[in-house]
Image: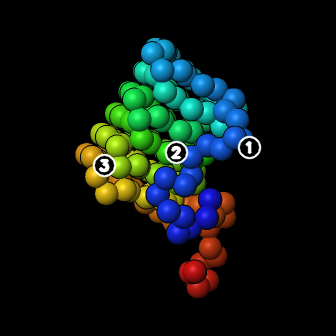
Amino acid sequence: MAEGVPIGSQGLSEEMPASLLLAPGSRFEGLLVALRAARIEGCARGQVRAMGPLEIGADAVVEGDLEVESLVVAGRVRGVIRAHDRVELCASAVVEGEIHAPGVAIAEGCRVDARCCVDAAARSPQPAAAGAPRR
């Protein structure tokens, strides 16, 4: 995802339909795996794995560990978030736990009680050679 993209711009688009949708009012407990883009609007408890972008809607509640390509949170998340690209917390987000990602965008107004580990170097699949200049 591009750097410097405004908050709220990384949501799912009509061009990339979700491979998995947990609709409002739905409850899921266990291991939830999405092979492409996914959206959670209901309640999920357990582990969530998304090979593509994951969006958590404003009324959604997720409790458990998330491993995703990228994440946009508008709802509530309690657990450990591991993103391979970026995490975006919208103004309505409430996050408790840990966030590990190469990039994190936090909108004014969200509530965060989390340990954050942001490492932009983790975005690169190969570490720089010893003594090589860092970019």
Of the 4 image quadrants, the one containing the N terminus is bottom right
Seen from the viewer's position, the closer of residues 15 and 70 is 15
Residue type, mark 3 in image: Cys
Tell me if label 2 and label 3 are in contact, CB under 8 Å. Answer: no
Task: Return the residue at label 2.
Answer: 71
Q: Residue 125, image x and y in percent?
A: 66, 60
Q: In terms of sequence position, does the residue under pointer 2 or pointer 3 come before the other? A: 2
Image color mode: rainbow
The answer to the question of whether label 3 and label 1 lie on touching residues, with beta carbons closer than 8 A, is no
At 66% from the left and 37% from the top, the residue drawn is 37
Relative placement, left or right, of 94 versus 27 is left
At label 1, which amino acid type do we have? Glu
Q: Is residue 83 left or right of residue 91?
A: right
- Give the distance between the C-alpha atoms of the residues marked 2 and 3, in whole angstroms: 15 Å
The label number, if any, that marks residue 110 in the structure image:
3
Look at 52% across and 29% down and name the residue there: 40
User: In the image shown, does 128 or 103 lie closer to the viewer?
Assistant: 103
Q: Is 32 situated above or below 58? A: above
78 sits to left or right of 42: left
| Place of residue 51 in the rendered image (x, y in percent of width and height, measured from the top left) | 66, 38
